[in-house]
Image: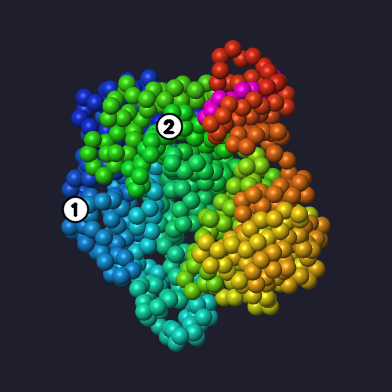
Amino acid sequence: MTDRIDLFRTRVPGLAFGGDYNPEQWPREVWSDDHRLMKEAGVNLVSVGIFSWAMVEPEPGRFDFGWFDEVMDGLAAAGVSACLATMTASPPPWMAELHPETLPMRADGTRLWPGGRQQYCPSSPVYRRYAARLVEQIGRRYRDHPALALWHIGNEYGVHVSTCYCDTSTEAFRSWLQHRYGTLDALNDAWSTTFWSQRYGDWQQILPPRIAPTFPNPAQQIDFLRFSSDELLACYRMERDTLREIAPHVPATTNLLGVWKPVDFFSWASELDIVSHDSYPDPADPNSHIEAAFGYDLMRSLRQGQPWLVMEQAPSAVNWRQRNSPKPPGVMRLWSWQAIAQGADSVLFFQWRQSRGGAEKYHSGMVPHGGEHTRTFQEIRDLGSELARVPSLAGTRVTAEVAVVMDWSSWWGLELDSHPSSGLRQMDANLAHYAPLFGAGVTTDVVHPTADLSGYRLVVVPNLYMADEAAARNLVEYVRAGGHLLMSFFSGIVDECDRVHLGGYPAPFRELLGLHVEEFWPLPEAGEVGIRLGDRAGAGSMWSEKIILESAQRVGEFTSGDLAGEPAITRHRFGDGVAWYLGTRPDPSTMRALVHQVLVASGVEPVLPGRPDGVQAVVRRAPDGREFLILLNHTSDSVELDLPVPMTDELTAGGAFADTVTLAPRRVAVLRRA
């Protein structure tokens, strides 16, 4: 794998800059203008061919790569490398005409038809056969092309079709279950089929969780989501393995979309040579950079700190929200540098040239409809120039002393129906705990519950509804060995088959936390309950519960409602470590005060002490010890910061060293020591 990464580093030695390039949308006379503008903007990498299947295979088995040869040759001549797509993200209309069985089906039996994109059943052997043939053609034709730096496999897997309920998927689901459980007896036990007379006597009786009269079996639903993520991964692996056999020296990736519920990123991470990410924070949301930051920390953590790639972001407005706000001046640059600060080695956009027609014609492009004499292109050009000034940032890494725990199966289980509250949402819980860490200026990883936690001073568990034996043991032993842990309500409730852990909630963590929960007390929609943390009065939302202390210490209590006077927040010494527990979701101010208390107790300090709210500070380090301190001002005010040692800003001319730095609103500094 190292050799494959080395090829990418050779072709793109510094930070990568560019975007999705779709020349098939434009006449050839535009292509030379593209090359001129790419050079002017400092573009060194483009994703190309993502939706080109219908153009290179206009009829089944008849390939026309002549025009695409011109595209690849033109990029090479312009000094631009290619992240070459396998073109399989959207099949041509002829596939649906010849093989309607490849079209996906919803849970209610509705077929999805051509006319958009991704109209294929992930389990379809017919789709996979045609895709494999195309990928082999692409691999053999371009494996030694001078522009090729990276394979781009598929595109945003699961973004439109994450599950399919057709007969083909049904057979594949049965095979997946047979491999997972071995026998029907084991499956019946795992799915608790003695409930509601659901016991299966033959594999052929098992279906996907199609529309049923009432709540479908929860274990069946979770397994179907596991299966669906695995089927998408199987499509990726098939293409990746085909290319690896043809061109073993070329690395492969696919663009993971945001923090996408249908696709288990942790199970995919080891299959990617480089993690790639599509990020679309909303300019109209003043806190969207915090949600984006969570995704960036997750991307960095998927391969244990390896630098990752921003494969897509918007130069300005998108087209798919109800209201599509543009990025105000300076925001595109600020958010691009935010990704770099949090470990990215690229800034790529969707797309290079704004489309004239089609569903995404109002999605911004690096070259807008108005051409090169626009604010957007001028900002793009300026950013490309800046990124070129710091090639030595590429390959440096970010390290963290704090980790937030997240698990996809638990996410799927948490948000099923027939629970104490329908308001529980995994990402809401994640961000409620992550935001105060981000606000405190603490660098944070996002990890699986079975990850090695020994390097972290503090581990935060916003919600781990589903905890199997390995996950529970890992967290317990982390604290026993001296770690600090902060866990919130409705964690450790069920096993991997959605069966309740008996012995008092949360049974796997009862000894660790020094308490048990006698009864859940979810709050009404928009309801609150008074809480007190020390001498601080606050409010809790979403949830409350009757906590029975065993050996834990009361840190906060409920001050109103049916549980007034009962514990709400606890602390417990366990082994050589400490475990904190929240029986509600404190308001942001109280949560921030609690997180500060926990950070101090665990010995975690901010990257830059004294940094005002809204200023982000992250350190990237090289193997030889070189450090870059990246500062980002997310506020609308100018700020002056004291530096720990004299440093110089790599983005400004002159190179003078100073012990303070002034950041105007939405500005960035990339600092290094003398």
* 290 displayed left or right of 572: left
- The one of 205 and 25 positioned closer to us in this rendering: 25
* 456 displayed left or right of 205: right
**Residue highlighted by disc 2:** 328
Q: Position of residue 674 (x, y in %)?
A: 69, 19
Distance from label 1 to label 2 (Cα)?
43 Å
**Callout 2 amino acid:** Pro
Res 563 visible: yes
- The one of 545 and 40 positioned closer to us in this rendering: 545
Q: Residue furthest top?
A: 654
**Residue highlighted by disc 1:** 94
Color style of the picture: rainbow
- The one of 36 and 542 positioned closer to us in this rendering: 542
- Of callouts 1 and 2, the N-terminal one: 1
| Magenta-drawn stretch contains 663 | yes
**How many discs appear?**
2
- Mark 1 vs mark 2: in front: 2
Local packing at callout 2 (Cα closer than 10 Å; few below 14, some 14-19, many 20+) is few
**Callout 1 amino acid:** Trp
Residue range in magenta is: 661-674
Local packing at callout 1 (Cα closer than 10 Å; few below 14, some 14-19, many 20+) is some
**Residue beneath the point at 76% across and 46% down:** 600
